[in-house]
């Protein structure tokens, strides 16, 4: 084969967004907002450009303004303390943080445990690092997806290098509970494992609360935490992400990162630094607005006959298409634009055990209310 299996041609998001453009369908496939983030943050980016901030290579670890804003955010939100000079690294979105962390830490043949279904870049990056992915499957029960802690424990072997976690979880919308996170932390300490935790949806939580794994006992020294400005501030195109952890781990990630992009997004780093300092009301309004959007689309999907896993977090809804008499999410998603003018993503692409994911389909609700209402109306006319 010309390409390695984990590179898989084009991503499902690119394929489905192209299908949406070709057919003029409403794109609820790829997760990106159809409204840009706050005017004040856009203005901060314009100011940075005009004032010559970040128009040339920014410092390798990221601009000091953003590193200290990340540190203040982790302290204000979660009581976590980090040193801005040695424990924070700015990356080209969370995507680069994931890649650099895996390339830095995973060696040939090392096993990486990841919650399945997993965000598509995980498999690719584990593969590029020469690692072996070991999926632990989240399973639907009582309207939500659950982690089987025994299965997680059984997945750990002498070759396990790290656990790659994601909470709030894409695509299921699950937010790991305090009990689940405590059990994961205990396991990591007991088996002396590193954890890379992808928390890009930390502010998109509608039930319960987001708890960072790094705050659990024994975890600060073995956890790399990843987040980004893309989801929280609705600027997915700016590609400003970051990773926090103890100096030895962050230094390792930085040595990989310097050969990927070296640095990125100069002026936008200054703007996201300002965004992280927005008052609590910004984050509350974001959450309330997205919760309402979740309900518009979830109610619409239920009315259209889908089984709906109403998510506790993220901006995705996973549905089961079997009540519609369908079993193959791939075929369903490829036909959906023609059938009713809506684009969605088959969850099977997020699985090694593709059969487990076959009847599930993901819809994104980070869209204007009227777009979601129109999509719900179209889905009701599905035939
Ligand atoms: N992790 C997860 C779970 C995601 O859903 C996404 C975006 N879809 C990313 C990482 C990538 O984030 P960024 O755009 O900041 O690279
Ligand atoms: N994270 C987005 C999603 O899950 C897509 C990002 C991408 O296209 N790579 O939809």
Image (cartoon, grey):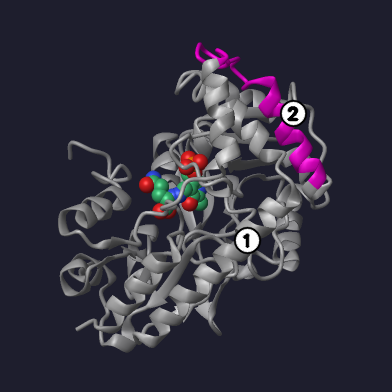
Q: Residue at x 45, y 51 (%)?
A: 35
Q: Residue at x 24, y 83 (%)?
A: 381
In this view, the residue in front, 172 or 148, is 172
Q: Which mark is residue 287?
A: 1
Picture coordinates of residue 48 (x, y %)?
57, 21
Query: Where 344 falls versus 268 (above or below)?
Result: below
For marks 2 and 1, give the one nearer the viewer: 1
In this view, the residue in front, 103 or 381, is 381
In this view, the residue in front, 195 or 39, is 39
Picture coordinates of residue 333 (x, y %)?
25, 67
Find the magenta span and give its range.
51-76
Specify whether 97 is left or right of 279: left
Q: Residues within 10 Å of mark 2 (few under 14, many from 20)?
A: some
The quarter of the image holding the C terminus is bottom left
Residue 305 lies in magenta, yes or no?
A: no
| Residue 153 shows in this picture | no
């Amino acid at each position: 084969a010309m390409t390695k299996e984990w590179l898989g041609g084009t991503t499902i998001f690119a394929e489905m967004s192209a299908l949406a453009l070709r057919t003029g369908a409403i794109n609820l496939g790829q997760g990106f907002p159809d409204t840009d983030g706050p005017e004040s943050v856009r203005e901060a980016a314009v100011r940075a450009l005009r004032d010559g901030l970040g128009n040339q290579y920014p410092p390798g670890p990221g601009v000091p303004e953003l590193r200290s804003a990340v540190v203040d955010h982790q302290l204000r939100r979660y009581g976590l303390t980090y040193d801005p000079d040695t424990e924070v690294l700015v990356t080209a979105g969370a995507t680069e943080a994931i890649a650099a962390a895996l390339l830095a830490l995973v060696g040939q043949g090392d096993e990486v445990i990841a919650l399945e279904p997993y965000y598509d870049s995980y498999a690719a990056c584990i593969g590029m690092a020469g690692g072996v992915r070991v999926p632990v499957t989240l399973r639907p029960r009582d309207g939500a997806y659950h982690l089987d802690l025994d299965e997680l424990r059984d997945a750990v072997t002498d070759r396990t290098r790290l656990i790659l976690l994601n909470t709030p979880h894409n695509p299921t919308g699950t937010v790991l509970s305090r009990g689940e996170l405590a059990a994961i932390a205990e396991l990591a300490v007991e088996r002396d494992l590193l954890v890379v935790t992808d928390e890009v949806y930390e502010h998109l939580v509608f039930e319960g609360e987001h708890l960072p794994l790094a705050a659990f006992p024994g975890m600060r020294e073995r956890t790399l935490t990843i987040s980004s400005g893309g989801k929280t501030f609705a600027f997915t195109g700016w590609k400003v992400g970051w990773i926090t952890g103890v100096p030895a781990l962050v230094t390792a990630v930085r040595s990989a990162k310097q050969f990927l992009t070296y640095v990125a997004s100069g002026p936008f780093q200054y703007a996201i630094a300002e965004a992280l300092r927005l008052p609590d009301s910004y984050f509350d309004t974001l959450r309330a607005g997205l919760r309402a959007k979740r309900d518009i689309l979830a109610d619409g999907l239920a009315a259209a006959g889908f089984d709906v896993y109403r998510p506790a977090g993220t901006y995705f809804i996973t549905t089961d298409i079997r009540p519609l008499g369908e079993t193959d999410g791939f075929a369903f998603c490829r036909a959906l634009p023609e059938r009713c003018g809506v684009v969605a993503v088959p969850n099977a692409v997020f699985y090694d055990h593709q059969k487990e994911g076959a009847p599930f389909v993901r819809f994104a609700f980070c869209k204007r209310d009227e777009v979601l209402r129109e999509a719900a109306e179209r889905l009701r006319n599905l035939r």
